[in-house]
Image: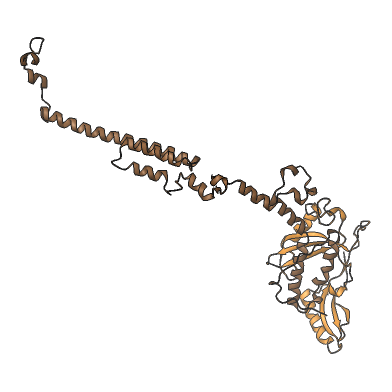
Chain colours: A brown, B orange
Amino acid sequence: MPYSFPIGFAESGCVLVPVRTALLPYVAGALRQLEAREFWESEADYQAAYNAVAEIEASMLNSCMTDLIDELRAARGVRPEFASVDPTLRTADMFYSLADLLQSQLDARGVLSSGWFGADPQYATSADVVRAMQGSDKTEGSGILDNVKGLLSSGTQAEDIATNIASLLGNEVGTIVQGGLLTTLIALNAANLALQTAQARNQAVNTDQFTKIIHALRGVVEPGDSILAALRGGDEANSTRNVVDLLK
Amino acid sequence: MIQQQPYVWLQFRDDSESLATQQYHIRRGTQPTIAQQAASTLRGLLRPVSGCRIITQSYILPGIELATPDPLAGVIAQRHAVFVFSTTEPDQYAIIAVPGLRDDLLLQTGPFAGLAIDTTLPAVAAFVLELTNGSWVNKFGYTILTLEAAYLQVRDAVFVPDWLC
């Protein structure tokens, strides 16, 4: 008697049927009757069934449980002491468990603070690590670069810059790691550059002041003679003709 | 190959689901389309004569192979090499079976040793290449595309009447 192909086939779930590989040729071969047109009611039933059976037959070389176990074990990782054991002879206890993997994650944490006699340690989170890499001040939430940027603003004295950077370093000892130190190095270079800029600015101010004094002494236009000659006349000073003697 | 007389093969079913088949030979060299037209005419004339329902029709071009080598000793016809192919149409497959699989074509090692067919062997590769060259189709006309699986199946281990195949 012909059969109708199951309604809702595509939406139905599937089951895992373990078949001993030695029996596989017979089980697969027995599906042959489902490939026959006369087994099914209509042409549509037949075509749907044929392809469904073909899918089953194609998947029968997927060594289901073995593959799954292998995948799971590969994800767990073999314990080093059993690495030399033949993979086909390894047992479940030769692989890390989920608890082992979680513990290794816990062990990888750094301790920020041991707490009161070690009773309540504070562990570093990934966010802490990121902040440290950025040279950030965990308690204040502002970075060294932000502070240095403020120090480099106009009007800040060079010695203040150095003093404040030293103070910053002292404050960051607890949280700075390599990334923070690198940031600090960059900040110091920036500070040095600021100092040089400040020195150049001071030098320019001094030059301007000296120019004004000279102009007041001799006028804007440089005289052809010297100021000294204008003061003393044509005769050069000597041991008996000099200002000191004249003032006596 | 010696060609035999072609025939139209019809399958009859009575009210109790019993089946009977009959061959109606036709002139040699008749083109399939002409043979189909002739069969259609014949079916129409058979209905008033037979109380059965005609359920299947085939046009057979029989031939007899005379110059084939002797079968290998120990080979069993029911041990089929079954190749499952995907086709150019999604979710449409082709199951191609070859009776009497040679044991030396099976994998010798691994979890499917003695079950899976070694598709790297020249004989197997050549067969697969022929089936995927664009000329062959599955039962529904979709062009065979890619080999999905190839392994030993024992077919006819349970009784499957010819009319089911």
Question: Does residue B137 show up?
Answer: no
Residue B93 at what x, y percent from top left? 73, 66
Q: How many marks?
A: 0
B76 displayed left or right of A142: right
Judge whether B136 appears above or below A171 on screen.
below
Q: Residue sitting at 82 percent across and 68 percent down?
A: A31
Q: Looking at this view, is B83 or A14 the one in front? A: A14
A151 displayed left or right of A90: left
Question: Does residue B54 show up?
Answer: yes
Judge whether A186 appears above or below B109 on screen.
above
Residue B25 at what x, y percent from top left? 87, 77
Residue B127 at what x, y percent from top left? 79, 58
A20 displayed left or right of A140: right
Q: Looking at this view, is B129 or A47 the one in front? A: A47
Identify the image quadrant of residue B85: bottom right
Q: Residue sitting at 38 percent across and 44 percent down?
A: A147
Judge whether A30 appears above or below A166 on screen.
below
Identify the image quadrant of residue A162: top left
Q: Looking at this view, is A117 or A98 the one in front? A: A117
In the rendered image, which quarter contains the C terminus of chain B? bottom right
Judge whether A117 appears above or below B46 on screen.
above
Q: Residue sitting at 87 percent across and 56 percent down?
A: B102
Residue A106 at what x, y percent from top left? 61, 49
In the rendered image, which quarter contains the N terminus of chain B? bottom right
**Most distant residue in the front direction:** A117
B134 displayed left or right of B25: left
**Most distant residue in the top direction:** A240
**Most distant residue in the bottom direction:** B48
